[in-house]
Every structure is written in C-alpha cells, then in structure tokens.
Amino acid sequence: MESFTNEFLLKIAGLIITLLGIIVPMYKFISEKNLKQRDLRFNTYHLLIKDLVEPDKETGKIMLDRQIATCFELRHFPEYFELTRRILCDLYSQWGQDTRNERILKEIKYTLKYIKIYNYTFLFS
C-alpha cells in the first residue's frame, strides 16, 4: 500500500513539474507580448498627439484634414482619455479664436462627447 502511495505521489510531482514547465514559459511569453503591445500603443498615441499639434515638417503648415483624422483616432485609446480630454479642451480654447478652425473644433467636440459617453458607460457596465 505504501509503495502505491509513493508511486502516486511521484506521478503527481512529475505532472506538476511538467505543468510548471509549460505554464511558466507561456506566462512569460504573454507578459512580454502585453508589454510590447502597451509600448506600441504608447508610441502610437504620442505620434497622434504630435500629428495633431505639430505643423508638417516639409511645408510648415498645419494640415487640417490630418488633424481631424487624428482627433478621431484618439477615440481608440481609452487608457489615455483623461489626458486626451485635457489636451483637446486646451486646444479648443486656443483654436476657438480663429474661424478657419471651425472643422477641427467640431471634431474636437465630437471626440470629447465620445469620451464623456464612453466614461459614463464604463462606470455603469
């Protein structure tokens, strides 16, 4: 009876060691992949902000359609909504003085509304 118990315990120990040999590398792989994904999203977000506020390097002009598209794309980064809201509110105040900015101001309003609805929905889901 005792040898049966020892054999059973050895088999269980072997199974646990085998599972750990699978689980640990899998966990490491998933963690690294998540870290790379977070880093990619961070860089993408900052490039979008740069596109929104910085003039084109070649022409030195602000590209309105690019800014509108960038403002729309900021909706895909909920982890940065708090910062995005502050940036867009400040830009709205700055750019609100110039009537040529009517289209981008409209898109800023849409994005701010989207963020507000998203945050409200997130709170109650």
Image (spheres, rainbow, N blue to C red):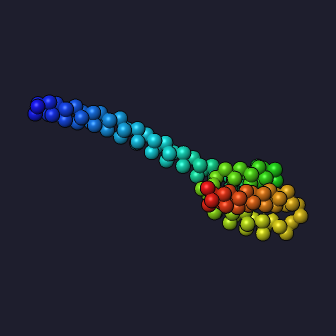
At 81% from the left and 50% from the top, the residue drawn is 65
The C terminus - image quarter: bottom right
Q: Position of residue 34 (x, y in %)?
A: 50, 45
Say left or right for 119 vs 102.
left
Q: Can you give x and y, in whole percent of width and height, for residue 22 in the image?
A: 35, 35
Residue shown at 14%/34% (left/top)? 6
* Left or right of residue 54, residue 9 in this image: left
Identify whether 34 is placed above or below 110. Answer: above
Q: From this viewpoint, which residue is outermost toward the left?
A: 2
Q: Nearer the viewer, residue 9 or 81?
A: 9
Q: What count of labels does the image hold?
A: 0
**Is residue 26 visible to the viewer in this orientation of the structure?**
yes
Nearest the eye: 24 or 121: 121
Name the spot of residue 119 as percent of width and height, x first.
65, 60
Residue 75 in the image, given as x and y percentages of width and height: 69, 53
- Tell me the residue at 89%/64% (across/down): 99
- Dividing the picture into quarters, in which one does residue 106 lie? bottom right
Which quarter shows the N terminus?
top left
User: Is residue 30 depicted above or below 97 in this figure?
Assistant: above
Q: Is residue 61 among what the camera can see?
A: no
- Residue 90 relative to residue 38: left or right: right
- Residue extending farthest to the front is 1
Q: Give the left or right position of residue 101, taking residue 71 as reference.
A: right
